[in-house]
Amino acid sequence: MRGRLTAILSALCVAACAAALPFIPVTPLLSTALSSRANDDVTAKEIVALEIKKDWAGLGALALGHIERDPEDTDWWVILAYAQIQQKLYAQAIEVLNRAVARNPEDIDPRNLLGEALRLSGQPVLAAQVLERAIGINSNTPATHFLLGEAYRDDNRLERAKEAYRDALRVDPEFSPAWIGLAGVLARTGPRIEFEEAIKQLMKLEPEIAKQILGAARQTR
């Protein structure tokens, strides 16, 4: 069940629109679109194009080029680390993100990415510690609560995972990754009525994913 839900979640793609950029990929890893860290519209569009193509090596190369020209621009450190995470280069991403957190401790996105890189590298306890500190800095970002829920889930702290997902939804009731995470844990732990409510809400936001979770839950009974 857990593997299926992880696959479902990893397939999630949330999109938003803006006048300057026709299609801006938004990820549950970040508080804002990655392209918002660019210095100009041309570069922002280049980032968007690479994200749409899932050209993570290309995005990393773009970031490295900018870092060579301005090694102190931490926005490009974040972009580089994001590309590294997508390529499963977790150790490299963790190194970059630790530097970014130290340089800009109030920037929530490097902390989010650091937590996720630690979780994906098999260190959910450390991931949770990073994300707990991030929430202490800024509790108004649903992505941070969601990622904390993921770390708790991987560490089998399921009651804490449910509460973290609910915290994300208190910030943004339509943050579908948190509904996915909550439904996945409720499918394992119950209560049944809460699982059904989560599926009901998810049907409004991501109906196909809701159907997959519901089907997987039925197969495990």
Image (cartoon, helix red, strand yellow):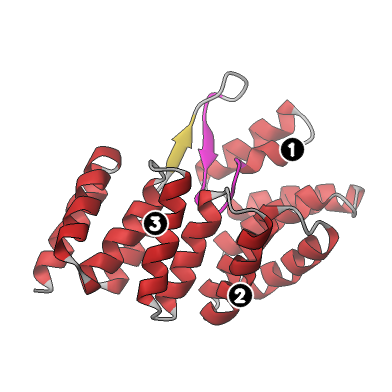
Which residue is rendered at x = 74% and y = 71% of the image? 95
Gap in Å between the C-alphas at discs 1 and 2?
A: 29 Å
- Identify the secondary structure beneath mark 2: helix
Q: On the rendered structure, is 211 left or right of 153?
A: left
Q: Quadrant of residue 219?
A: bottom left
Residue 88 lies in magenta, yes or no? no
Residue pictured at 20% horizontal, 69% vertical:
190
Q: Position of residue 66 (x, y in %)?
A: 83, 47
Category of crowding for the residue at label 2, using alpha-carbon neighbours closer than 10 angstroms: few (below 14), some (14–19), many (at least 20): few
24 to 195, vertically: above or below: above
Residue 11 visible, this orientation? no
Q: Where is mark 1, residue-wise?
A: 38
Give amino acid for label 3. Arg
Residue 46 percent across, percent down from the top left: 66, 35
Q: Which residue is mark 2?
A: 129
Viewer-nearest of discs 3 and 1: 3
Q: Is residue 15 left or right of residue 191?
A: right
Query: Which residue does the numbered mark 3 point to in the structure image?
Result: 166
- Density class for disc 1 (Cα within 10 Å; few <14, some 14-19, many ≥20) is some
